[in-house]
Image (tube, rainbow, N blue to C red):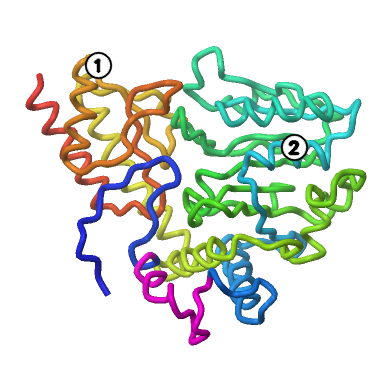
Amino acid sequence: MTFTTKRAFNFNAGPSALPLEVLQKAQAELVDFQGTGMSVMELSHRSATFEAVHNEAIARLRKLFEIPENYEVLFLQGGASLQFTMIPMNFLQEGKKASYIQTGAWSEKAFKEAKFFGTPVEAASTKENNYKNIPAIENINIDPEAAYVHLTSNNTIFGTQWKTFPTTGDIPLIADMSSDILSKKVDVSNFSMIYAGAQKNLGPSGVTVVIARKDLLEKANTNIPTMLQYATHVKNNSLYNTPPTFGIYMLGEVLKWVEEQGGLDVIEKRNEEKAAYIYDVIDNSNGFYYGHATEDSRSLMNITFRVADEELEKKFLAEAKEAGFVGLNGHRSVGGCRASAYNSVPVEACKALADFMVKFQQDNQ
C-alpha cells in the first residue's frame, strides 16, 4: 500500500515524523486489527489481544535499549511534564535536596516543579550564555546528600545534547530523554531512571515511557495519590486505568521498525549522517548561517541556527515552507531556525534541506 499524496519534509520538533512504513501498516490495520473486526482503538485494554500488543512493546523496548532485568518499564500518561512532578513527589521528601543540572527550558520546568516538594539545587547551569553548551563534567557540583541528580539529555529548543554523562555514584541519576531516546546506544545501568515522552523518536504523543531501577522505586513515597505513585503502575503492568492503547500499539510498531533498520548502531550512524549534511552547510557558509550551540554540544536531533540577516531569515523560512519543508521555525522563545532530525526523518529530507540552504545562500548573497 502506498500513499498517493505527497509527503512533506517534516522537521517538526514534536509531535514529529513517524516512519512511513508504520503509518501505512496502521492504516491497513485501522478498521480490523488481527481479524478481531475492531480497530486497536476499540479493543478492551483488558483483552488478551491488547495485552499481547502491550507486552510485546515492552519486550521490544527492553531488547533494543538493552534494559537490565532489575529495571521496570512503564507506559504512563501526562507526558514528560507530569514526570517533572511525579519524580520529586515520589523521591524528594520535604526538607531534602535534589541536584538539577540546568541546560534549557525543560530542565528549568523540572526544577520549578521540584520546589513544591523539597529543595532543588542547581548543580550546574549554562543559562548565562543562553544555553549554548552542556556544562563540563568538572563544573558540575552535586550535593553529596542529594536525593537524586536530574538532567535533560537533549535540549530541543537550544539544540544541545549530552555526549557523556556525569558519574553520580550512590546518588540516583535521573534523565529526561524525551527528545533523543533510542537515537543511539545508552548504558541504561548508569541511570536510576530514564523517562521520555513518545512524540519524538518512539511514536505519537500520548505515551510516556519510564524506565526505573527497582531499588529506586522501593524508596518511593507512598503517602501520595494513587495514580501518582509509581508503585501503582508497576503492580498493574501500566494497566491500572485505561492506557493510551493506540499510542502503545504505534510505539510497538515504531520499535519493530527500528529493529528492521538494523537496531541502534545503524540508527546512530544514520542520525550522524543526517545532522552532518546540515551542520556542514552551516560551517561552510562563511557566516551566512550560524549555529546556536557550541560545536562540542551540538545536538544530532535538533539543529538550531540563524541566518545572519534578519530579513533574509524571514525570507528563508517563507521560501523553505513553499518548498515543502515543515517545522523549520525556531521555538517562539528563541526564534531563528530549527531542523529536528529525529529517527524517522529520512536521510533524503536532510540532504534536500542542505541543498536548499546552499542554493538559498547562492541566490541571496
Q: Residue furthest left?
A: 363
The image quadrant that residue 346 belongs to is bottom left
The front one of 353 and 1 is 1
Check disc 1 and report the residue beneath it: 308
In the picture provided, is 323 more to the left or to the right than 172? left
Q: Characterize the local packing of mark 1: few (<14), some (14-19) or many (20 or more) Cα atoms within 10 angstroms.
A: few
Is the C-beta separation of discs 1 and 2 under 8 Å?
Answer: no
Q: Residue furthest bottom?
A: 35
Image disc number at residue 168: 2
Where is residue 237? Give x, y as percent. 74, 66
The amino acid pointed to by label 1 is: Ala
In the picture provided, is 260 more to the left or to the right than 144? left
The amino acid pointed to by label 2 is: Thr
Q: Dividing the image into 4 quarters, which one contains the N terminus? A: bottom left
What's the magenta region? 23-40
The front one of 51 and 33 is 33
Count of labels in the image: 2
The front one of 140 and 128 is 128
The front one of 21 and 287 is 21
